[in-house]
Amino acid sequence: MQRRVLILCTGNIARSQMAEGLWRHRGGEQWEVCSAGTRPRIPLTQVHPTAVQVMAERDIDISGHRPKHVNDFLNETFDVVVTVCAQADQQCPAFPGSPHRERWPLDDPAIAGTDAEQVLAIFRRLRDEAAEHIDAFLKNENVQTC
């Protein structure tokens, strides 16, 4: 039976989108993976280009992802809800079925400023930190990771 996970952050343009792509890649067909934001920048129609770039370095394509609002998922049932920032954690609504909650605080990539090399380094670090959290969770769930 496929399990469901929702990954939340504030804007849903970087951290949660990278985590969604990683979880989908590592969890395989055993997981249906969604991400959303508590205050996504809609009508923005794509994720942060640097997030797309650093995920492509791991052969994971998130270029077709789009920001979504958490309200789009309020009536859906999830096995796990993961928040990747404090603000999303504080604003995380209740979901039907009382899913397991995980809190994985990842820095806001906006801290990188405008220096291209520093931005790239921070996005890579965030990608790798999200991967570590996901791998540890899936290992504890006895799920084979890729």
Image: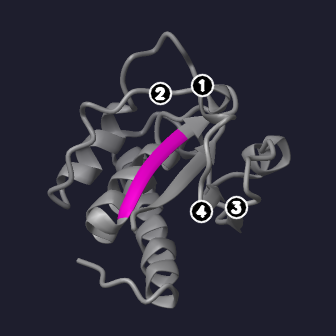
Three-letter residue code for mark 2: Pro
Q: Which mark is residue 67?
A: 2
Density class for disc 2 (Cα within 10 Å; few <14, some 14-19, many ≥20) is: many
Asked whether disc 4 touches disc 2, contact meaning CB atoms under 8 Å apart, the reply is: no
Density class for disc 3 (Cα within 10 Å; few <14, some 14-19, many ≥20) is: some
Three-letter residue code for mark 1: Pro
Q: Of residues 112 and 8, which is closer to you in this image? A: 8
Residue depth check, mark 4 versus mark 2: number of the one nearer the observer? 4
The kind of secondary structure element at disc 4 is loop
Q: Which residue is mark 4?
A: 79
The kind of secondary structure element at disc 1 is loop
Asked whether disc 4 touches disc 1, contact meaning CB atoms under 8 Å apart, the reply is: no
- Secondary structure character of the magenta stretch overall: strand
The kind of secondary structure element at disc 2 is loop
Q: Residue furthest left?
A: 59
Cα distance, mark 4 to mark 1?
Answer: 23 Å
Cα distance, mark 1 to mark 3?
Answer: 22 Å
Cα distance, mark 4 to mark 2?
Answer: 21 Å
Q: Residue furthest front?
A: 1
The magenta region covers 31-35
Q: Which residue is mark 3?
A: 99
Identify the mark nearer the N-term, 1 or 2.
Answer: 1
Asked whether disc 4 touches disc 3, contact meaning CB atoms under 8 Å apart, the reply is: yes
Three-letter residue code for mark 4: Asp
Say which quarter of the image contains residue 61. top left
Density class for disc 1 (Cα within 10 Å; few <14, some 14-19, many ≥20) is: some
Identify the mark nearer the N-term, 3 or 2.
Answer: 2
